[in-house]
Amino acid sequence: MAQKNLAGTPLDIQALTHRLGNRTVLHDLSLEVGLGELVGLLGPNGAGKTTLLEIIEGIQTPSLGEVRLFGHHPRRLPPAARARIGFIFQRNAIPEHATVAQLIELYRRVHGDSSTLQQTQQRLGLSHLLTRNAGELSIGQRQRVSVFAALAGSPSLVLMDEPTNALDLRSKRAVWDTIIERKREHTLSGLIATHDMEEAEALCDRVVFIEEGHLRGTLSLLAPAEAMPTMLNVDFHAPASFIHSSAAMQSVTVIAADRGDRWRARCPKEQIPGFNAALLEAEREHGFNARLGINPVETESTYLNYVSKAD
């Protein structure tokens, strides 16, 4: 069988399985991250995100399958390919007795003095920390230094494991904005392991769901793959008699109720007009104010809906 030309593909994972003793922690995973694409690996703690990243880095060897970074095995990366990859993790080893200014100077010498480094320093809010030792920094400040280090060489691919976990809002936004700006200015690809729905939606072009070592699909593929129509959340007020007697309620699923007359239902997009018409007709007939609101189903709701079907 002819082999794919992976030289230009930032990350390609094929039929990867990993076992720890008698336990299989990753099950036949295949995933490709294209040029300029940020992919979110979204799942709960213990889903296999960190294990997968460690295999991609070359820290662990998979039981079956293969990983390629720009066409190369993770443990046999030539210097030119390695220089194109940045890493952002929850905890990074930073010399505690070096000042932030000394660390930035080190990265400047390694990667060259450029306006990009200065811009990244400013975006991450490091300028006022230059005289501080790394050991004196807060968790959020240290993480911002780590992000600076990962992006200093203008990498083509970044691998991120919970990059903003436990950070305060200011630090989190600084990291997000820096990654978004770097992607906008350069062809940046990445895989972001996170359990933060907001982070995935803020940074990623595509979200891949992982649960108990299984890839459950991507956000864009979930509906077609399972013949599941596009769903919308419908918020409205109505008496319980409408909920229990209206034929329109047969096409929706009530997912929340509050104070007896406030409801949230999930409805297929194509059935919204009929549901709205029935609700408005009941509103006129029975004299209540429906206060109708329609919103897309959030990433979290889509994920939970999907994995509940997989159980």
Image: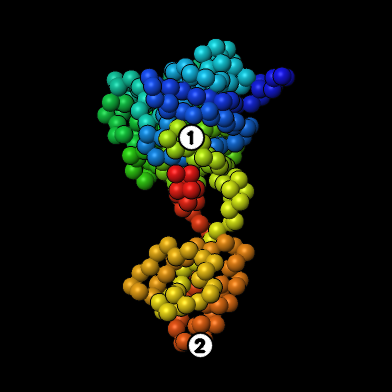
Q: In this view, does 45 lie above or below 222?
A: above
If the image is split into quadrants, where does the C terminus sit?
A: top left
Residue neighbourhood size for the residue with mark 2, other residues' Cα within 10 Å, grouped as few (<14), some (14–19), many (≥20): few
Q: Which of 41 and 24 is in front in this view?
A: 24
**Where residue 164 sits in the image (x, y, percent)?**
39, 38
If the image is split into quadrants, where does the N terminus sit?
A: top right
Residue linked to disc 1:
214
Residue linked to disc 2:
285
Quarter of the rendering containing residue 82: top right
**Residue at left 51%, top 13%?**
75
Quarter of the rendering containing residue 76: top right
**Where residue 296 sits in the image (x, y, percent)?**
53, 59
Element type at mark 2: helix
**Where residue 167 sits in the image (x, y, percent)?**
34, 40
Q: Which of 112 and 157 is in front in this view?
A: 157
Q: In this view, does 298 lie above or below 139?
A: below
Q: Which comes sooner in the sequence, label 2 or label 1?
A: 1
How is the structure coloured here?
Answer: rainbow
**Residue at left 31%, top 26%?**
134
Q: Is residue 135 above or below residue 124?
A: above
